[in-house]
Image: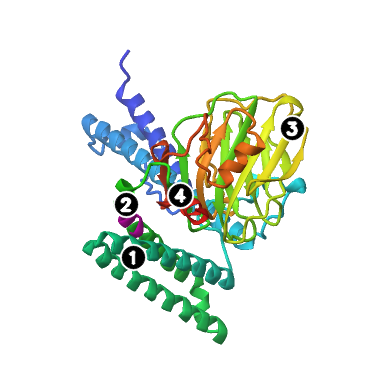
Amino acid sequence: MQATKSEICRRLFLFSYLFLKSYSQDFGGQTQFICTSVPKDMDICAATLQNSVPGEDLKTTVMQLRETVLQQKETIMNQKETIRELTSKLARCESQSGAEPGDARPGGRRKEAGTKNTMGDVSRGPADTLTQLSQTLQSLKQRLENLEQFSRSNNSVQANSLKDLLQSKIDDLEKQVLSRVNSIEEGKPGLRNETEQRGRVESTLTSLHQRITDLEKGQRENRPLDKFQLTFPLRTNYMYAKVKKSLPEMYALTVCMWLKSNASPGVGTPFSYAVPGQANELVLIEWGNNPMEILINDKVAKLPFLINDGKWHHICVTWTTRDGVWEAFQDGVKRGSGENLAPYHPIKPQGLLILGQEQDTLGGGFDATQAFVGDLANFHIWDRKLSVGEIYNLATCSSKAQVGNVFAWMETSLDIYGGASKWTFEACRQLN
């Protein structure tokens, strides 16, 4: 049944009233109502019709009112969303500015996720920043000296040109560090911009590392694929290497590698292996002031390693699931042993093996404070316990040294991210 004009008019009046009421509430009551006098005995709709508003115009008015309501609601929703985002960002900034450095958990385990700094490089004071920059500059100088030696032996004009350019940039960075030392000593107010200045310097260092890496790539044809080392120059949450294949299920293992670091406190996480449901399936970490630890299925054993002296050290850890027996070797010598480390728990397959970062989730959740800083090379994994003689051969770079049957150190086996760089492995060359 079609509605009469009188019914249509009443509906329009009710709709207009509700719309104006809602509009007034949304905008703080700023809307004004315009009233028209109507004789006491006259019908409201009849009075409206006397104003000669055609039926089509009424429909158009209704559509326009509906369109306006939808637009205003969308605007309000967008404004509310913006306010929520700004409030969230403000809360994060306040929590970071007021947060105290997290303490280590009892037993030396990794810290809780709630105390992580995953916003980039770990925060440091002026003295710590200068120390870190000085160490990085020294590392760059050493790499440039290696490049210079290589270019002399190969008579490369291009290498010499690039070396001179990079040396110039290092000199400029040293001047910046010296300037900041003077600022600290004189107590200049410019230290308020220390975070911004450090960001610019470290951005330049990252770019410089990349250019040196590009130059080093020219030497790949002159070395075997296993004669390389990975360098992690800064404590960040974005520099790492990912092993391309997963590990199999293992009831025993030996993991060995060469490490060089002078980072303090703690060298960080040389490697971590995570599987679905367990981020700490197999981890080697030295975090904060705690000793180096190995974690298997989140169970911890403290290792008697002392390696943060800036020199190359060879370390090996063996483990068997039977009784959880483990042994630790540094530079070919047994330094410690124990048992009950995740007994009768096999290492699970189908996980991700990461070098240089500790995983809080499968393949991610990196924390800058737990990142490895230094050089790493000849990382190998076996699915058995190596003998004392086999470990000694590895530590002395013997020609009899074996390679891992689960993972062997090869450039083609890794994907590298975040500016971590490669260079010809030095330790065995120094021993020989």
Residue 56 position, x and y percent, is 21, 30
Q: Is residue 390 magenta?
A: no
Q: Position of residue 207 (x, y in %)?
A: 36, 60
Q: CA distance from mark 4 to mark 1?
A: 19 Å
Q: Quadrant of the N terminus?
A: top left
Q: Amino acid at mark 4?
A: Gln
Residue where numbered disc 3 is placed: 325
On screen, 212 above or below 194? above
Q: CA gap, disc 3 to disc 2?
A: 43 Å
The dot on residue 148 is 1
Q: Position of residue 374 (x, y in %)?
A: 53, 56
Between 191 and 208, which is closer to the camera in this rendering? 208
Label placed on residue 219: 2
- Disc 4 packing (10 Å; few <14; some 14–19; many ≥20): many
**Which sits in the foreground, 294 or 141?**
141
- Disc on res. 248: none
> Is 169 on the left-hand or right-hand side of 352?
left
Question: Magenta part of the protein: which range?
Answer: 212-217
Disc 4 secondary structure class: strand
Q: Is residue 215 magenta?
A: yes
Residue found at the very far top of the displayed protein: 1
User: Which residue is tagged 4?
Assistant: 229
- Give the mark nearest the N terminus, 2 or 4: 2
Please tell me which of labels 4 and 1 falls first in the chain. 1
